[in-house]
Amino acid sequence: MILAIVMFTFGYIALRNAENREPDVSSRSYEERLQRYTSTIQRDPNDPAHYNERGDEYFALEYYENALTDYGKAIELNGE
């Protein structure tokens, strides 16, 4: 039940954030942003915002398991 609530909440946030993005939805653009977020996480692995942002990119690409993993890590680091 809690997992379903978390997935719904983060899915809603990802969709809301996607609405505010630039209209460029090319796969290459998302892949490039994924690489940037991954590099940022490697440099600063304790910031939950980086995982949340990369989770949004995974979600946009429909890599839902990866998105859920990153959202879970963001929650863990955020202490919730």
Image: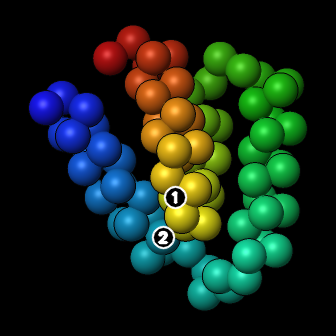
Q: Where is residue 23 in the image (x, y as percent from the top left)?
A: 60, 87
Q: Mark 1 points at which residue?
A: 59
Of the two numbered discs 1 and 2 in the rendering, the one whose residue sits closer to the viewer: 1
Q: How is the image coloured?
A: rainbow
Q: Which of marks 1 and 2 is nearer the N terminus?
A: 2
Q: Which residue is drawn at 79% across and 63% down?
A: 31
Residue found at the very far left of the displayed protein: 1
Quadrant of the frame with the C terminus: top left
Q: Where is residue 55 in the image (x, y as percent from the top left)?
A: 56, 47
Q: Does residue 60 lie above or below 4 as drawn? A: below
Query: Does residue 11 appear left or right of residue 62 in this picture?
Result: left
Can you tell which quarter of the image residue 39 is in? top right
* Looking at the image, residue 47 lies above or below residue 62: above
Q: Is label 2 in a helix, a strand or a loop?
A: helix
Residue at the image position 75 percent from the left and 53 percent from the top: 34
Residue 74 at least partly seen? no
Vertical order, 70 against 76 (above or below): below
Mark 1–mark 2 Cα distance, whole angstroms, equals 10 Å
Q: Quadrant of residue 22?
A: bottom right
Disc 1, SS: helix
Q: Quadrant of the N terminus?
A: top left
Percent coordinates x, y for residue 74 in the rendering: 50, 28
Label 1 with label 2: CB-CB less than 8 Å: yes
Q: Which amino acid does label 1 sit on?
A: Phe
Q: Name the residue under label 2.
A: 18
- Find residue 61 and report its horizontal and vertical position in percent: 60, 66
